[in-house]
Image (cartoon, rainbow, N blue to C red):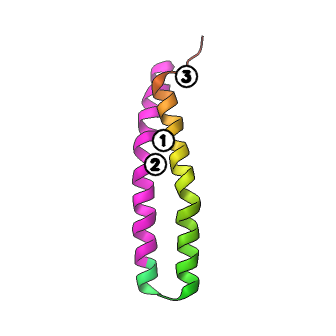
Amino acid sequence: MNSIRRIAGILWIAIAPVALYYLIKTGMSEIEKKPTIDTKIQWIVFIIVFIPAAIGLVIFGYYALKGEYDEN
């Protein structure tokens, strides 16, 4: 079970930047489709809110990879 947690840690570390990249890519394409101020504000808020979540995923993955969640 501990090895599964460590593998999951690697996955969390990998998923966070990929998800952030695709969120920014999608936001930019949506802003290009409809360049009004409400669309820009909406996507900027989405991205700003998700950045700490992505950082949290990386931290969670780091601790899982480090073995902090192993059973004693």
Q: Quadrant of residue 19?
A: bottom left
Helix, strand or loop at mark 3? loop
What amino acid is labelled 1 in the image?
Val
Q: Amino acid at mark 2?
A: Ala
Residue at the spot x=51%, y=29% of the render? 63
Which residue lies most toward the top here? 72
Mark 2 and mark 1 lie on one chain; the one further toward the N terminus is 2
- Position of 62 with respect to 46 (left or right) is left
Residue 17 highlighted magenta (yes or no):
yes
The tag on residue 16 is 2
Q: CA distance from mark 2 to mark 1?
A: 6 Å
Q: Secondary structure at mark 2?
A: helix
Residue 40, percent from left and from top: 52, 80
Mark 2 neighbour class, 10 Å CA radius: few under 14, some 14 to 19, many 20 or more: many
Q: Which residue is mark 3?
A: 68
The magenta span reads 1-29
Q: CA distance from mark 3 to mark 2?
A: 19 Å
Please say if the residues under marks 3 and 1 sit with CB atoms less than 8 Å apart.
Answer: no
27 above or below 1? below
Give the residue type at disc 3.
Glu
Residue under numbered circle 1? 58
Which label's residue is closer to the chain start, 3 or 2? Answer: 2
